[in-house]
Image (tube, rainbow, N blue to C red):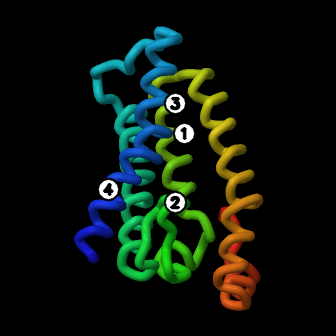
Amino acid sequence: MKGNLYIRNLLFTVLQPGIVVGLFPFLIIQFYNIPLPSIALDVPVLLLILLFISGFLILMYCIYLFIKFGKGTLSPFDPTQELVTSGLYQYSRNPMYLGVITMLIAEIFLFKSNELGIYSLIIFIIFNGFIVLHEEPRLQKEFGSTYAEYKKKVRRWL
């Protein structure tokens, strides 16, 4: 069953954050003819690449926590069976979303694109709405007082 959990997480990672951080920004770059960043790896470009990688590592670590402790996936269609409150979830109730937003911020500055900035703002608004209107009520219903206590201790974002 655990191997199946890894495969399901891989699938949902490609389908969800992969589309948000990869496919849609690629389509925006193509549609608006946004030039690719300079091949010269100067300090700002390297820092932006490191920022992107840090967001990716945050995402992957959170997926690992969902597999190990939550016994589920990042997808709302196949959610965790246990409330995950360890690791980065001690500091933010939504570090996985923060990892995705971090990658999008890196893309905005790497491509110097207002269009990616607008897209990222829309994605953040969608994430926040989804969290407030769907995820938090579901978690409250599913985990009751445990989730209520967790909400008191840990902020939604940072």
Residue 135, quarter of picture? bottom right
Q: CA distance from mark 3 to mark 1?
A: 7 Å
Say if mark 3 contacts mark 4, CB within 8 Å.
no
Judge by depth and name the residue closer to the eye, 112 or 69. Answer: 69
Q: Amino acid at mark 2?
A: Phe
Foreground: disc 3 or disc 4: 4
What's the mark number on residue 10?
4
Q: Does label 1 or label 2 sit earlier along the sequence?
A: 2
Judge by depth and name the residue closer to the eye, 88 or 110. Answer: 88
On screen, 66 above or below 107?
A: below
Give the quarter of the figure containing the N terminus: bottom left
Say if mark 1 contacts mark 4, CB within 8 Å.
no
Element under disc 4: helix
Q: Residue at x 23, y 71 (%)?
A: 3
Other-residue count near label 2 (Cα within 10 Å), few / some / many at <14 / 14–19 / ≥20? few
Other-residue count near label 1 (Cα within 10 Å), few / some / many at <14 / 14–19 / ≥20? some
Q: Amino acid at mark 1?
A: Ile
What's the mark number on residue 77?
2
**Residue holding disc 3:** 109
Q: Does label 2 or label 4 sit earlier along the sequence?
A: 4
Q: Amino acid at mark 4?
A: Leu
Q: Does label 3 or label 2 sit earlier along the sequence?
A: 2
On screen, 105 above or below 12?
A: above
Q: Residue at x 42, y 13 (%)?
A: 35
